[in-house]
Image: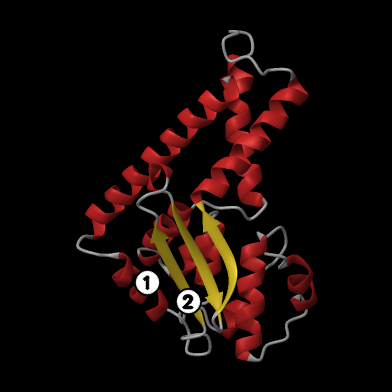
Amino acid sequence: MQCRLWHCTLSQQHAKWCSATWHLTLRSLAPMQWSQLKKRVEDTFADSVKGRLEVWSTRYRHAVHQYGESWITIDKKKIATMGTLRFEIACWKTAQQLREQRQCTDWRDPTQLSDYYGARNEAHQMVVDASIFASCDLNNSLFQYLNLSIDHALASENPIIKAFALLDKRCGKRRLESFKLVNQHPLVCRFYEFRCFAEGLRPDQFSQAAKMSSF
């Protein structure tokens, strides 16, 4: 029961956060609907990838907390799915595993409280590193991406922003060839691989990108 109640509370908190950040971003760029966001993002793409990679998003009104799903396709084939419910479950399971390993499963014990909630933050990063995102992560990241210079987008710590920057027409072949793949997120490597193929590039690190792009 404790786990179920905690998960329910966590889901409500994340749903509220997604909703709050979504509406905050909408206000900052209003008026803009998803269709407008999708068009503006895809209009930034280089000619070599334009029309091939597309972003999609939907929201299930009758689902718990109206959770949504976003996905990315290349040549009409889905290559990435970002579902809020899947993200929440993965975070909950990972956090529980960390708590059990560290023996801090009782949030009512003051001596365990810090580690108990700290496990949630650590689990969140572990889940993102494993290429699991919530739907609102894509939406919010794309809004941010549109307001960044290409240099700031490529240097972003947000893997979604950095990945889309690699498709940007402002990112030319010279930037692609000098881009370093060391310790990059799998989504970034996947987009890098796709853009290089589209541009006919075969940089020395391309074999590394192929190994890392298991997104």
Residue 94 at x, y = what percent?
Answer: 67, 37
Q: Could you tell whether 95 is left or right of 15 in the image? A: right
Quarter holding residue 163: bottom right
Position of residue 192 measured from the top left corner of the image (x, y, whole percent):
63, 74
Image position of 8 (left or right of 127):
left
- Binning the other alpha carbons within 10 Å of mark 2 as few (below 14), some (14 to 19) or many (20 upward) gives some
Residue under label 2: 54
Residue position for label 1: 38
Residue at the spot 58% in from the left edge and 20% down from the top edge: 1
- Judged from this view, the residue extending furthest toward the top is 110
User: In which quarter of the view is residue 205 placed?
Assistant: bottom right
Kind of residue sitting beneath label 2: Glu
Image quadrant holding the C terminus, namely bottom right
Give left or right: position of 144 versus 124: left
* Residue at horizontal 48 percent and vertical 64 percent from the top: 153
Q: CA distance from mark 1 to mark 2?
A: 8 Å
User: Whole-percent x and y of residue 155?
Assistant: 54, 61
Q: Residue at x 52, y 54 (%)?
A: 83
Q: Earlier in the sequence, mark 1 or mark 2?
A: 1
Mark 1 element type: helix
Q: Is residue 156 above or below residue 207?
A: above
Three-letter code, disc 1: Lys
CB-based contact (under 8 Å), mark 1 and mark 2: yes
Task: Answer whether residue 78 is visible to the viewer in this image.
Answer: yes
Q: Would residue 179 be seen by someone viewing this image from the given angle?
A: no
